[in-house]
Image (cartoon, coloured by chain):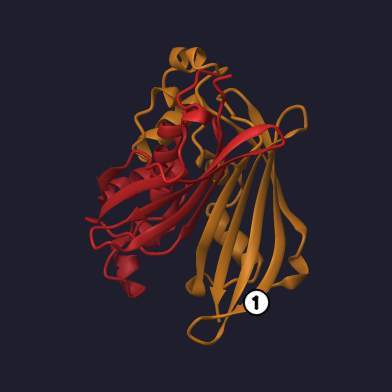
Chain colours: A orange, B red
Amino acid sequence: MINKSLINTKLDTFDFPVERGKIKEFANAICDPNPVFRDREYALKEGFRDVLMPITFPMTFVFQQAAENAVLESMQKMGMDPNRSVHGEIEFIYERPVCAGETLHGEVWIGNIYEKAGKRGGSMTFVEHETKFYDGAGKLAVTVRNIFIEKG
Amino acid sequence: MSAKKYFEDVTEDEQLPSFQQTITRTHIVKYAGAGGDFNPIHHDEEFAKAAGLPSVFAMGLMHGGMLTRVINDWAGNGRVKRYRVRFSGMVWPHDVLTFSGVVVRKYQDKGENLVDCQLTVVNQKGEQNIDGTATVSLPSRK
């Protein structure tokens, strides 16, 4: 049973160091040859302070969480059944570009939890899972908004 | 920041550069290591089959990450304000994925030059795996 008392509650906080080596590994994994993710000199010429963080890189925040499988643990905390649940969508919202060398502070929140009728009958429960990344000055840099869907 | 694309040069319905990738289990494993998704359903063949699947399948964020090249290469580095992907179909090893995009709207908001794009990932059967949107902020020639 999905735990609706978690609506608008903070699940977790963590620090997220944005690291050059990890960015390069990630860029290789998403098959993006862009030197801005690998070559510091190139990134500086492009006007950045260091190599640029790829758009979906914030998802590697899971490495900073205590749990072995942070996403699964989040779902379990919410009372979701992983066998009936899917990752519906994810959105990355950038206030500004982020580069290697920064350490961001992350907060994981549950937003709204709501039901919708399924196309083939039954109902689906939607869970909004949001992670906000703040910089050293306390300003919001990136927001990652997930929607998880549990089929009834 | 240097300019790859100026706002004035964008036309609605403009096609973004597209590319193809044949997906392998090695891609899945590399992304698991880089991205931190160790759900066995993506890399453990026995686990996936026991769950009733024909094989392992790729985590959405893998090809969701690969798709970012379409918007990033077109707009230039550091220009993306929003990037959203909806996972609409599963990706299996040996799938040949086409990553592409198109400009949907150009407009100004609070003094910023913004362009909305529709992004998509389809497989060799024409089935859509990802339905995505992105908004970029572009410099002006002026």
Q: Secondary structure at mark 1?
A: strand
Does residue A63 appear anywhere in the picture? Answer: no
Tell me what residue is drawn at x 38 percent, y 43 percent.
Answer: B66
Position of B98 relative to A139 (above/below): below
Does residue B34 appear anywhere in the picture? Answer: yes
Does A151 sit left or right of B74 as displayed? right
Q: Which quadrant: the N terminus of chain A?
A: bottom right
In this view, the residue in front, A46 or A1, is: A46
Residue B96 place in picture, x, y as percent: 24, 53
Residue occupied by mark 1: A115
Q: Chain of mark 1?
A: A
Residue B97 place in picture, x, y as percent: 28, 52
Number of numbered labels in the structure image: 1
Residue B132 place in picture, x, y as percent: 47, 53
In this view, the residue in front, A49 or B18, is: B18
Position of A37 relative to B63 (above/below): above
